[in-house]
Amino acid sequence: MIHLDDISFTYAARHRGEHTPEVLKGCTLHVEAGQALAVMGATGAGKSTLSYVLAGLAPRHTGGRLSGSVVISGHNVAETPPPIGSVGLLFQDAATQLFNTTVEDEIAWGLEAMGLPPGEIGERVRASLARFELEPDRRRPPWALSGGQQKRLALAALSAMRPRVLILDEPWGGLDPHGRSDVHAAIESLQAAGTTLVLMTLRVETAARIGTVATLHDGELSEPAAAVDLLADEAALIASGLYLPTSAWPGLGPVHPLQDGPPAIEIRSLEFHYPSESGDTKALHGIDLTIPPGQFVAVVGPNGAGKSTLVRHFNGLLRPTHGTVSVLGQPIGRRSTGEMARQIGFLFQRPEQQLFAPTVREEVAYGPTQLGMEKADDHVQQVLRRFGLETVADSPPALLGYGAQRTVTLAALAALSTPIVVLDEPTVGLDGHGLMQLLTWLSDLRASGVTIVLITHEMALAARADRVIALEAGRVVNDGPPATVLTEQLKGE
Amino acid sequence: MTVVFDSYVPGSSWLHRLDPRVKLWCTLLGLIWVFILPGLGWQILFLTAIHLLLLAAGIPWWKLGQLWRQMAILIVLILLLQPYVHPAGPQIFAWGPLRLTLGGVLEALRLALRAIGIAFVMGTLLYTTSQPALVRAIVRLGLPYAWGLTISLALRFLPAIQSLYRTVRDAQASRGWIAHENLVRRIRSDIPVLVAVMIGTLRMSDQLTLALAARGLETMKTRTIWRDLHMSSRDWAIAVTFTVGMLVFLWWRWTMP
């Protein structure tokens, strides 16, 4: 079904004289009809590029140079685009591939493009809505769905076209456990229907679920092998940056006893309403919390539970509808988010989207300069060294690879040297190297007595915190030591 | 993500069910009407009728109030400035070269009501017609599919770009940015945000190109339409009634002494 022979790919240079390395180097792969294969690779290994090549999009729509042959069900997709509906591609960020204004129109779009009669389109749309459990959302706009629902919708739109080959790029990335199991069920049903699947991932557990795995390392693709054999060689996985077992994590336990003094964060009767078309939507329902200085707190809960809404109150990005928020003993009151930056460092979801400075150095220096830090230049230089960014200090951050961009965002946060740090899902999209870098920094923060509040779906990381707060539907449903709270959470799932 | 570009209020009233091509035609007639209504009384009658029509179609009061609020600044500006532009009739008071006259005030009222009338005619279309239906109508009226798709994509991605701007601004604020009182400094501080948004938008557009190609935009056969528009006898009746009504009004308006 899929025959890749000696494929090499290089992206076009952005300017004259720029050397662009080969992203894929002599890759060969054969997948029989109805089989499923996981391609496992670290950040920047070339997984997305391989997806584009398989789907016939690269180099046709990406630019660049492709050599070798790519034959999908007898059709050379390197020469001409695959026949409509024969190959489907689920993007890493499913939201970017949804471009219609309602869920059912999203599913119908491809079928209309295939020129199917309206009656058949209607039948396929209804079947897809039912199969991917999207019937209640059929008239909602795709952008109003949760991350898990968006992935299911993208899969529904693709599967309605009945492709013989489906390529899935990180289908579980950024999803909570519920979302992951939803998408997993959807993929299983496609597998059962005989669709040939190629699944790109940087997660060992995802690869293990598929059964057959090939690794992509520095653009070179290994022979597919049984997942159990490949995963048995843990040392090789760690060395290639694919995996970081919890046994290799740096210590995240408290170094000093909790400090005296006013609470780092104190919240009383916090309520928050989002204004919406149908009036107000209550996102937080009377939350009370006290986080002592130096504590490491993990906030867990399903997508839409109100985790991000809660932490956005800590630095004034959101203001309470009712209740109060105090930081280091002082009510936030009317203080702006910019003023709060002296006390709270904040890492957003998808931080790489928020890089705005012309060079890495200026990006890292932005915070210290805005806050008027003394000896800001020396401090920035130290931070650049600490995160290994000296060699790219004068490069535009927007043009760096994904992994390097994530490092820049961490460095920019570290440069603020705040006594409290809030991180919103910082592990999403990180490979073993990226995770190690994040954990080492968190370990350093713990040693310096910094208060850490971290939103995560990674239970292994939450288990390392001093305390876990579980949110559901805008309420704290559990709060206590990780062993107690996480056991309850697992029971709930 | 805030969706400020979609005003549609889902419903199943006869106005919602009316063929969107008829609604587009009636909107055009309504706009002409707004410009040819002969006096304040007629304008108030017209606006009252539209309000009643929208309420009968299940559009909530607060939605109408929202449109009034959106128009408020424009209305206030018209009422404050227009009377001095064309002074006419008895003088109410004078201050230096500025003369407030009864004719000027009435003219300002007429202009303000006209602006509100335009907003409510457009509102009637947008509150009762979903974006896909609107795009389908435009395509079925003869616009090439690529144009319809472009409109649809713009409607889809404008909120995404708006959200990206807010995200970058929040990220900057979290690193110490404080809004300047000074407008020039404020605009200067906006430049890096706009650069980040532009880069984000270009990335989004690259992804969109790939997404469209992956779903077969370049290889598509003759495109079919899942839920094509069909003019019912009621749609025809309403289109004809509105057209005849407009012609009768025009005849009366121009033959009126």
Image (tube, rainbow, N blue to C red):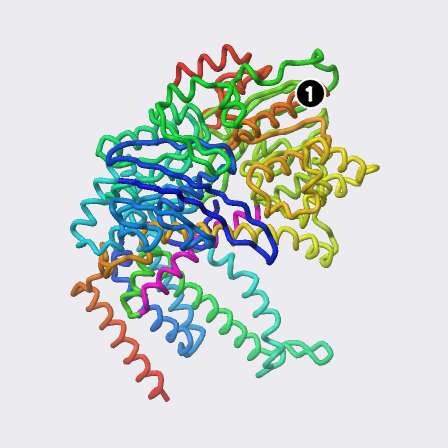
**Residue at left 43%, top 39%?**
A92
The correct choice, above or below, for B117 with respect to A14 in the image is below
Q: Say above or below: A71 vs A303.
A: below
Q: Residue at x 33, y 56 (%)?
A: B217
* Residue with the mark numbered 1: A263
Q: Which residues are magenta?
A: B143-166
SS class, disc 1: loop
Q: Is residue A118 left or right of residue A167?
A: left
Q: Quadrant of residue B72?
A: bottom right
Give x and y (percent) for residue A51: 39, 42
Could you tell me how many numbered marks the image carries? Answer: 1
**Residue at 55% from the left image edge and 65% from the top image edge:** B74
User: What kind of residue is marked 1?
Assistant: Pro
Q: Residue at x 29, y 63 (%)?
A: B137
Where is residue A353? Give x, y as percent.
56, 44
Q: Is residue B152 magenta?
A: yes
Residue B80 x, y percent position in the rendering:
61, 69
Q: Position of residue A483 (x, y in %)?
A: 51, 10
Name the residue at the right extreme. A375
Of residue A269 and residue A424, the one placed in the foreground of this image is A424
Please say whether residue A410 is one of the residues in the magenta stretch: no
Q: Is residue A99 above or below residue B114?
A: above
